[in-house]
Image (spheres, coloured by chain):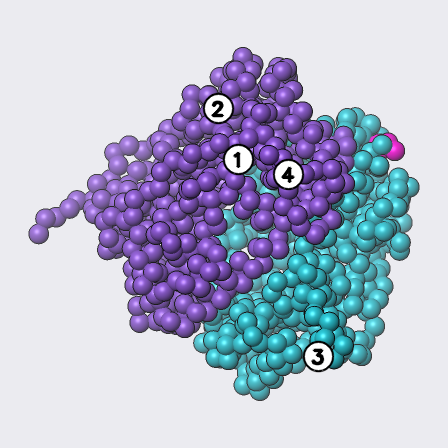
Chain colours: A cyan, B purple
Amino acid sequence: MRRFVSLLIACCVAVPAYAADVTSYELDNGMEVVVLEDHRAPVVVHMVWYRAGAADEPPGVSGIAHFLEHLLFKGTDDMEANELSQTVARNGGSDNAFTNQDYTGYFQRVAADRLELMMTMEADRMRDLRLTEEDIVTERDVILEERSTRVDNNPNSMFIEQRMAALFQNSPYGIPIIGWRHEMEALGMDDALAFYETYYAPNNAILVVAGDVEPEEVLALAEKHYGPLEPTPGLGDRVRPLEPPQLAERRLVFEDPRISEPYIVRDYIAPARAAGAQEQAAALVILAEILGGNDFTSVLPRKLVFEDQKALYTWAYYSPLSLEETTFGLGIMPSPGVSLEDAESAIDVALAEFMEDGIDPDQFERVKFQLRAAHIYAEDSTEGMARRYGAALTSGLTVEDIEAWPDVLAAVTVEDVMAVAASVLDKRSSVTGWARPPQPEQEVTQ
Amino acid sequence: MIRAALILAATLFAALPAHAAVDIELVESPGGIKAWLVHEDELPFTALEIRFRGGTSLDAEGKRGAINLMTGLIEEGAGDMDAQGFATALEALAADFDFSVGGDVLSVSAKFLNETRDESVALLKTALTEPRFDEDAIERVREQVLSGIRSDANDPATLAWAAFDAYAFPNHPYATSGDGTAESVAALSRDDLIEAHRRILTRDHIYVSAVGDITAEELGALLDNLLGDLPAEGAPYPDQTQMNFEAGVTVVPFDTPQSTAVFGHEGLERDDPDYFAAYVMNQILGGGSFTSRLFYELREKRGLTYGVYTYLSDWDYADVLNGQVKSANGTMAEAIELVRAEWQKLIDEGVTAEELEDAKTYLTGSYPLRFDGNGRIARILVGMQMIGLPPEYIETRNANIEAVTLEDIQRVAERVLQPDRLHFIVVGQPEGLETTN
């Protein structure tokens, strides 16, 4: 294994939390290290996150970030194909990986005393992957089957692809993470290695270790195994094509015979949590809760399911973690006998009334209390905590931002929520999608 | 008045698998409700898991879907609160209640903060003991269930499992979906829901575990308050299934690019002396997610699928060796041939010493890792009670895995794996496959 030797000087920020104590460092070669202590069980979750996801792919090779994630389970100069997973299993652990628009992550969950073995293997495959042409051909078939399983066998997933492609006019977020089939079919060794050699480097990686560990020991092991790895020189800031101002509302109808229940989803472009500036995102989290977070008490279900009885379900959602602008969404599945046109105008009327009437102060307080409780319940899962840190850190945030988040949420006022609603719920930066079964001939020609 | 003393378990089980400490206290409330408790005060909340054995299999004759619809209505109004009033009260407490039901069990999962524990338990009690079944709520939830039934009819995996159940469990409640059919759900009345509640939410069906910041005394009092008013006895449990698998394929035509196959045949009972050997054997065959023989042959070597797995399906009244694989319509026939071949190969050649050792180290090493988090531990403990395992099982389980020998695997392979009974249900448009017999 090729190793790059460097001197390691760690700096530390220790921030106390509830169950998990958080410590962070940076290795000399640029790799970030975050340790979340949780001594309730003798378990450790070891994760390496790369600041590289589907949105970092060059044009024309959609799916290469995810394909490479699969290929990382093939051989290295020191390991046979699939040896890493077999070794993890032999040690009683489990392992997997995931790819998002903004990051790719690899993790093992194992007894705490096996941490060093995990680091040895994960460090090995960061720089020393050895692929064969057969790996490429076979694993490409696997990802095509995965696309069939996740997307083509599920009209709801196909509908999401169509909406995102229409919503993002310039950002790569409009391209599906798994890739478009015609481009996936052509992915090759060179595409994979180009992405790998650029982005799989310590100065583009974050190590998150969570569980029954001592921070000093983790740091010593990280220095030993990750410290010698050579960084990619000249790896600049992540620069992505950004969205222009969106000026025209978009609409689409997606028809598939497997859709038995017609429904509508509208996605708006929305700001994400940004380093040192999480206030708008916090207000949007609360807006989503107020509008649709609870099937009984939120604004949309109260109005559309209970009062008007026009909907079987209605919902709202927001994804605050994203490197660039993200989405805020609303949906409605009309009651039998209610047309999609009527359902859409009902949701528009409900939104207009909400903008007029504002927020019930009692509901606002209940939502805030729930968000506080959610932080306590979240601490019950060490793996979940590790994931939240990794996802936030690869989405442009810092440990300080993560620690500040509960307070930022708590500080949101009713006025903040209404202000962000007024700016984000703008149809000009939205896509409204109808999903339904194919319509009988006569209706199409009308 | 007879003063019932809180009977606290004298036994404190210090179960130490490898090194995970799970100290289980056996609690029996003054009113006689038993529970397993792990006191854990690191976080200021308690996870409470309650189970009612029987699940949708306790539906009355001709009332398929009643228990499912009733479960959906538990949080749709109770006591003096309508659906929205109940949800508002729950939201204000920041507690988390989840009600769900399957073929064997109705599950109530609750999480509540220390600071709102009493109010949360009072609210949960209202839901369990005084559901209103308001007509408007019934109609709303009925439409939601019907919408789910229509969607399921377009989902390949749901169709495949439904067809498998119909094939495997004739003349048993397991044969049909607990959701009911469009017709049976449409016909359910409010009285049917009251009857469904009376059939399953009874003290003889209860199993309980709790993990969190709560003492045995507190839990005992809590349980009597929460569950003590439920009727003593509910509907009787169903009979054991009579299964009769035949080797072959059933194709369910469905217009989709990738076929889904569900397969299996009779398994063996959880308390069978060969259970551990069969469990280890399955790990090697199709249990290990990235290490099994089926994973290697179908995915790693040939790229035929994204996922293939097998498992010992442990229903209360049926034991099946089950599996699932998805593959393109053009390659499903090949995938099925490979699954059959692996069945036969394991019988003919057994497993290698290395495979056995690897499976054991995985199974024994991963076991203690399950016990992290209040919610996870509570779910494991209530599950153990339902299959009749004692608390000491946590200590002895790994020794039972370690004891499995190559000869045990060979014997159990010959006994359990039955290529002449292995049946595949395939949903899709698989090329070169037709329904047999």
Q: Which residue is mark 1?
A: B369
Tag 2 residue: B276
Contact between labelled residues 1 and 3, with CB atoms less than 8 Å apart: no
Label 2 neighbour load within 10 Å: few <14, some 14-19, many 20+: many
Residue range in magenta is A128-133
Residue at position x 52%, y 23% in the image = B416
Q: Is residue B307 left or right of residue B138?
A: right
**x then y, percent, for residue A175:** 80, 58
Amino acid type at circle 3 is Asp
The residue at which mark 4 appears reads as B435
Magenta stretch: includes residue A304: no
The CA distance from mark 4 to mark 1 is 43 Å
Residue farthest along the left direction in this orientation: B1
The residue under label 3 is: A426
Quadrant showing the C terminus of chain B: top right
* Mark 4 neighbour density, 10 Å: few (under 14) some (14–19) many (20 or more): few
- Labels 4 and 1 touching (C-beta < 8 A): no
Crowding at dot 1, Cα within 10 Å, few <14 / some 14-19 / many 20+, comes out as: many
Say which of marks 2 and 3 sits in front: 2
Asked if the residue under mark 4 is in contact with the one under mark 3, i.e. CB atoms within 8 Å, the reply is: no
From the viewer's side, name the closer residue of B52 and A6: B52
Above or below A350: residue A166: above
Label 3 crowd (10 A; few <14 / some 14-19 / many >=20): some
Determine the residue positioned at 41% across, 73% down: B136
Work out whether residue A46 or residue B88 is closer to the camera in this orientation and state it.
B88
